[in-house]
Amino acid sequence: MSDLKDRLRADLTTAMKARDSLRASTLRMVLTAVTNAEVAGKQQRELADDEVVGLLSTEAKKRREAADAFASAGRADSAAKERSEAEIITEYLPEQLDADQVRALVADTIAALGADGEGMRAMGRVMGALQPRVKGRADGAAVAAEVRRQLG
């Protein structure tokens, strides 16, 4: 069993004992998403820590997008709840890369692949090499935007 999944379960128990309903409901939701991912497909399997991190980053992104949607609709209370859930989920993700780190990582990858003069044709190759290095540590859309900027 993955260490991250064990940590989520232990923290859920702690939150329930502390009567922290927001944390408990958020962790329940995350653990349900993990279980659903494990039983999806033809055969049940155990998710590895990196797969759980990917799922957590997806869930955090959903919460941020929902918070933005609620805020633009004038529902500040729902937006605040979604932001709080996203913060709780983010606690379980690896430290996020800032814009400068992403920029440097993209530049290094382009140089390592020799994709300097190829332009946008090298986008797929560069993204393929970058994804394992930034998974769970940076938003994929932000990384893709930086790759486009440096290639184009």
Image (cartoon, helix red, strand yellow):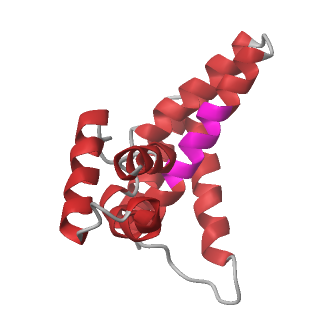
Q: Nearer the viewer, residue 86 or 145?
A: 145
- Tell me what residue is drawn at x 64 percent, y 41 percent: 62
The quarter of the image holding the N terminus is bottom left
Looking at the image, residue 8 sits to the left or right of residue 99; the answer is: right
What is the residue that sits farthest to the right in this orientation? Answer: 73
Give, as a single range, the part of the protein colored magenta. 56-65
**Residue 62 colored in magenta in the image:** yes
Q: Is residue 100 positioned above or below 27 on the image?
A: above
Image position, residue 95 (x, y; %) = 29, 42
- Tell me what residue is drawn at x 20 percent, y 61 percent: 111
Q: Nearer the viewer, residue 111 or 40?
A: 111
Image position, residue 29 (x, y; %) = 64, 48
Dividing the picture into quarters, in which one does residue 126 lie? Answer: bottom left
Looking at the image, residue 98 sits to the left or right of residue 1; the answer is: left
Image position, residue 7 (x, y; %) = 38, 54
**Residue 136 colored in magenta in the image:** no
Q: Nearer the viewer, residue 123 or 33?
A: 123
Secondary structure mainly formed by the magenta segment: helix
Image position, residue 8 (x, y; %) = 45, 51
